[in-house]
Amino acid sequence: MSTATLSEPRTRTGTRSTPRPAAPPRGTTTSAPRPSPARTTPVAPPASSGTAPFVLLIMVLLTGGLVATLWLSTAAAADSYRLDEARQVARDLSEQSERLHRDVEAAQSAPALAAAARAQGMVPAGDPAVLLVAPDGTSQVIGDARPAQPTAPPAPTPAPVPPAPGAAGTTGAQAATDGQQAPAPAGAAAAEDRLVAVPSGQDQPEQAQPQQAQPQQAQPQQAQPQQDPDGETPQDDAAVTEAGR
Amino acid sequence: MARSPATLSRPPARAPRGRAPSGRRPAPPPPPPRRPARRPASRPPDPRRRLRVGRVILVAVLLLCTLKLVEVQGLRAGELSADAAQQRTTRLTVPAERGAILDRYGTPLAFSVEAKALVANPRRISQDWNDPAVRSQPGSPTPDQRKSAIALGMGRILGLDPGPIFAALTSDRSYVVLAPLVDPGAARQVREAFPEIAEEDRESRQYPAGDVAATVVGSASWNMDRQKIRGSIGLESALDTTLAGTDGFRVVDTAEGSDAVIPGTTRAEQPAQAGRDVVLTLDTDLQYAVEQRLREYTARVGASNGSAVVLDARTGQVLSMASSGGFNPAAPGAPGAQLSNPAVTSPFEPGSVNKLVTMAAAIEAGVARPEDVLQVPGSIRVADRTIGDAWSHGTINLTLNGVLGRSSNVGTLMTAQRVGPDRFADMLRALGVGTRTGIELPGESSGSVPAREDWSGSTFGNLPIGQGLSMTTLQMASMYQAVANDGVRVPPRLVEAEVGADGVRIPSAAPEGVRAMSPETARTMRDMLQSVTQDGRGGNRGTGPQAAIAGYPVAGKTGTAQQVDPGCGCYSQSNYWITFAGMFPAQDPRYVVALMLDRPPGGDSAAPLFHEIGAYLAQHGAVPVSTAPPRQVPLTLP
C-alpha cells in the first residue's frame, strides 16, 4: 500500500541519509528493478543505525513487561496468601466473638445470676420495708423490716446435705435451672434480682427458731422455707447454722 | 479461523509466481512470452486453477462453518447454553440468619450462632481402608481400627462420648450425622485430623435463660428437609416467618464434579435477608421470679399445675407469663417436659373471680352501690338449683362490699337477679370472656361461654359465680386489666416490636381498646375489690387478706371452682381450680396479676402467691408506697 509513496522520495532520502528507518528496507524489496549498487551502499548504514535503538526499545519494553508481569503475579500470589491469612484471622475472631457473646449471655441470664448469687451465700430479700422520708425530715417505716431469710438447702435427689450456704447455692442452682424439682428448692430457687447479702451465719440463729416453730399457715412471706417435704428442715438448718458460725 | 488457512495457503501460491519472474528475468526479457513460457514450466496444475479450487474449498469450508455457527449460535443456542449452564452453574443458597427473640430490655431469650454438623459416609470409609493398595501398605489400620481412632479423636476434641460416634461409624449406611451441632473451630479441628469427616452448615439456637419463659418463647431446631432452622413450639413457631428471614442465593460456576467455586464466575447474587429480631413485652427477671414463685408454691400446695400472668395495667402488655411446668428449649423432647403454655391453651372455670362481672354490671347499670346492704339468706334457689355460700350462715346483713369481699354466692346471685341476664351477658362479652385475646401465641383457647339463647333457668345461677363457663389465665388477667385501666380493656400482647436487620424498629400495632365500663365504675370496682384483701375481725375479714402487701393497697378477688368429675359428670367435691386475680396499687394500678392452681389437694388459696409475686413486683418496678392506712369498710353489719 504505502510502497508507492514511500519509494518516491527514496531517491532523495537515500543520498541524504535520512533517519527514516522503515523506508529503505521496504523500498529495496518492493521496487527491485530500480535500485543501483551505488545507492544501496550508503542507505544500509543509516538503516541499521535507525533500527538498533528501536529494537533496543522493544527489547527493553518486553523485558520490562516481563519483569512487571512476574513482579505483579508474585505480588498477587503473596497478597493472596496474606488475604487468606487475614481471612482466617477474621473468621477465627468472629467465631471467638460469637462464642464469647454466647458465654456472656448465658452467664448474665437470670438463672445463672441467681445461682451465682446463691453460691456467694446471698438469699432473696423477701418482703422489703420502706423508709419514707417526708420533706420536713421526719421518716416513717412502711412494712415490717426483718432480715432476709436464708432458705433451707434444697435436697434434690439424694445429694448430700450441703455443708454451707455457699455450697447450697450450687446445688440449688441446678434445681432452679431445671425448675421441675418438687418442693425442695422452695425458697432457694426463688432467687431474684434483689438479693440481699447475708453474711453467712449472722442471721441464722434467729431464723432457725421461727422456721421450726411456725406452722405452715403463718405469715405468707415466711412460708417459703417451712414446708420441706423430707422433714429435713431442722437438720438442714442446724447444718447451715453450724457452718455459718 | 476462516482467515488463517487463506493466508497460509496463499504464500505457496504466490511464491512461485513472485520468484519465477525474478529468477527468470535475465533469460526471457520480453514480457509477452512470459505467460506461454510459464505454462509449460508449471505443467500439470494451473496455479490459477489451484487458486480457484482453493478458493472454492475455502469458501465451502467457510460456508460450512457459517452454517454450523448459525446452528450453534442461533438454532440450538438456547438448548446448548442451557446444557452448558447445567454442567457448570450451581445455585448456592445463602442462608439467612434467624432473628433473635429479646425481652423488653433487650436481654436475649433466643438467638442463633453458627454451627457445623459433622457427617461421614461409613461405607466409603470401609471401602477406602479396605482398598488393596491401602491394605498392602504395612501398618495401615483396618477400617474398624480407623473408625475407632476417629471416634476417639472426635470424642477428645468435642468432649463427647466416643461410644455413639463409633456405633454410627460402624453402621452400614452411607450417611450418618456424628455430631449435630459443633462449634465451627472444633469442627475444623476434627476435619483436619480426620479427612473422612465432612461438615455441613447448621445454625444453633441458643437459649441463654434456659427454661425461663420456655413455654412462651418455645423452641426451634434444625429441619433436615428444609435445611433450615424451624420453630416448632411457642413463639418460635408462631413468628417463624418473621424470624426466619429470606434465604438469598448465588449462581456461580463450579468445577464439574466438585463444589469448588470458580472465582469470578458469580452470575447472579441475591443477598440473604436476615430474619427480624422480635422484641417481647416480657421482662426476663420478672419472668424468672414469677416462675420460681409459682413453681415453689404449686409444689408446696401440691397442685398438679399452675399458671400465672402479669400484665401492665395500662397497656395490657404481658410482662410475665409463667407455668409451673416447662421444658428445656435445647432439648424439648426430654421426659417430663411440658411443651404447652396452659396460661393461654387451657381454659378452666374461674369460680368467684367471675363475680367481678356481676358487680361491675350492677354498678354500671346503677342497680347497686357498694354501701348497699343486702339481707343474705343461707341459700338461694335459682330455677331447679339451690346454691349456698362457702360458709354456712343464717340470714346476715352484708354490704355489697361484703358480698364481694367475703365472696357470698347468695349475695352475688341476688345482685345478678337485679342486673338481669342481658346486662350480665353484655358485661361478660365486654370483658372478653369467651373470645380469644388475639395474643401472638399459637393454640390460644377462647374458653367457653354458653350462648345467650341456650341459657336454661339454672345457667344464670351458675355463670355469676364463675361456674359453667371457662376462661384462660390470660383472659382472666385481661378482665381485671379493664378494671385497672379505668374501664378500657386493652387486649394483651406479647410482641412489642420487630427490629429489622438494618436496625429499624417497627413497633407492633397497638390493639384497639374495648370500653367495658365507665371510669367511675372501674374506680368503684377497685375500691370494692380491696374488701377482699381487707384484714378485719370476724365478719369484716375478706377472703384474701394474705394477698395484701404492706404499703400497697391491693384490689383482687379469690376464686375456687369445682372441677367436673368425669366419672359422674357432676361437680367434684374434692377437685378445685383455685384462682386469684388482682391489681396494685389499687388507686392507680401498675400491675395486674392472675393466678390459677389446678387441684391443690388442700384447696389452699392462691392469695399468698399473689402476695409473693406482688412484693417482688413492688421492688422490681420501684412502685411508690402509699402512706394511707389500709382501707377498712364494713363488710358484715349486725
Image (cartoon, rainbow, N blue to C red):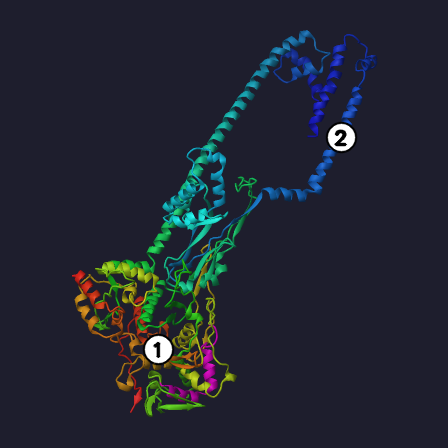
Residue B410 included in the magenta stretch of the image: yes
The residue that mark 2 highlights is B59
Disc 2 is placed on an element classified as: helix
Q: Quadrant of residue B34?
A: top right
- Mark 1, Cα crowd under 10 Å, few <14 / some 14-19 / many 20+, is many
* Residue B600 shows up from this direction: yes
- Mark 2, Cα crowd under 10 Å, few <14 / some 14-19 / many 20+, is some
The residue that mark 1 highlights is B556
* Residue A138 shows up from this direction: no
- Image: B627 above or below B144: below
Residue B359 position within the rendered picture, expressed as x and y whole percent measured from the top left: 40, 84
- Toward the viewer: B547 or A228? A228
**Considering only order in the chain, which callout, 1 or 2, is on the residue closer to the N terminus?**
2
- Image: A204 above or below B577: above
Q: Quadrant of residue A187?
A: bottom left
Mark 2 and mark 1: span between their CA atoms? Answer: 103 Å
**Residue drawn 47% across the image and 39% down it:** B129
Q: What's drawn in magenta, residue-wise?
A: B408-436
Outermost residue on the left side: it is A245
Kind of residue sitting beneath label 1 = Gly
Image marks 2 and 1: residues in contact by CB distance under 8 Å: no
Kind of residue sitting beneath label 2 = Val
Residue B458 position within the rendered picture, expressed as x and y whole percent measured from the top left: 45, 87
Residue B480 included in the magenta stretch of the image: no
Q: Quadrant of residue B58?
A: top right
Describe residue A40's horizontal placement relative to residue A54 as left or right.
right
Can you say which quadrant of the picture contains the C terminus of chain B?
A: bottom left
